[in-house]
Amino acid sequence: MIPSFETLEIELEGQVATVILNRPDKANAINLPMWVDIQNCFNWLDSELSVRAVVLTGAGKNFCAGLDLDMFQNLHHGSSDPARLAEALRQRILELQRNLTSIEACRKPVLAAVQRACIGGGVDMISCCDMRYACKDTYFSIKEIDIGMTADVGTLQRLPKLIPDGVARELAYTGRKMSGEEAREVGFVNAVFDDQSSLLSAVQDIAEEIATKSPISIRGTKEMLLYTRDHSVQDGLNYIATWNAGMMSQKDLMAGITAQAESKAAEYED
């Protein structure tokens, strides 16, 4: 049974789930319920074996306007002690980080389909995804710098591993808008489409193609890519040797080899 959420909508088509940020009247700004919903949603997607790939997009004209500023009204702590106040804020930030890291930790590939504005927390969010796709009118902005704060839930840690370091620094220091086409040129997005309709159609097709592959092989591939990002080449080689020694499915391997030999699509267990 597909769970329901206050700020998200989930659609399931075949083996592809589409997660829709569903606060279009607020340009999908991330309020406190949405942070919690995101983690609960992606924990469910991770555990639901019938889901093999996920598309993440936003309802309405914009993907995400970033942090709902009303959240700043809810950062108070009962104590007047500066140390206790600081610790409480640190714990809140760590919690928000965990909320978004659930996207990255989801074993299924997550494809972000981004229309128009993707600001602040929206950039944090899609930096957790496996791939990103945009429209011609899409723009990205690390807007935190313009409200007097340092981005703190993932952009500064993940973005320099996705695009050239100097470009990441310029975006973070200036808060300027990066167009969809520039994002494609620097490798942040895989492709740019004319409009939201063609964007969603193309990303759905890619997700459906991923869903035809061996689920356990896809999950292993994502595990290796994330591990290799944060470890040395030698560490990564050692890990994949150990992983495949214990996790490679002989059943899937034979199904794939047979399907290739017979020029047909393989069928895999969820």
Image (cartoon, rainbow, N blue to C red):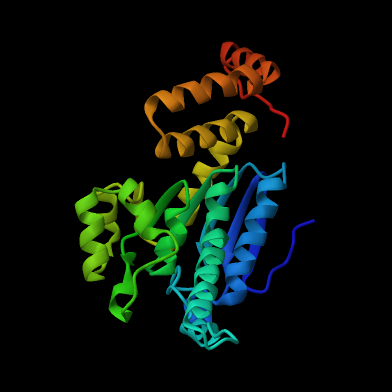
Give the residue displayed 23% in from the left and 59% down from the top: 169
* Residue 119, percent from left and from top: 38, 70
Q: Is 183 positioned to the left or the right of 152 in the image?
A: left
In what quadrant of the picture does the C terminus appear? top right
Q: How many marks?
A: 0
Q: Residue at x 43, y 34 (%)?
A: 228
Q: Is residue 187 visible?
A: yes
| Quadrant of image for the N terminus | bottom right
Find the residue positioned furthest to the right. Answer: 1
Q: Quadrant of residue 11?
A: bottom right
Task: Tell me where residue 30 appears, x and y as whole percent.
Answer: 51, 74
Please provide percent x and percent y for residue 174. 21, 70
Q: Residue at x 52, y 23 (%)?
A: 240
Compared with 187, 146 (above or below) is below
Q: Nearer the viewer, residue 93 or 174?
A: 93
170 or 249: nearer the viewer = 170
Return the residue nearer the eye: 45 or 18: 45
Rendering coords of residue 32 (x, y %): 58, 76
Residue 59 visible in the displayed image:
no
Can you say whether 191 is above or below 38 in the image? Answer: above
Q: Is residue 202 left or right of residue 262?
A: left
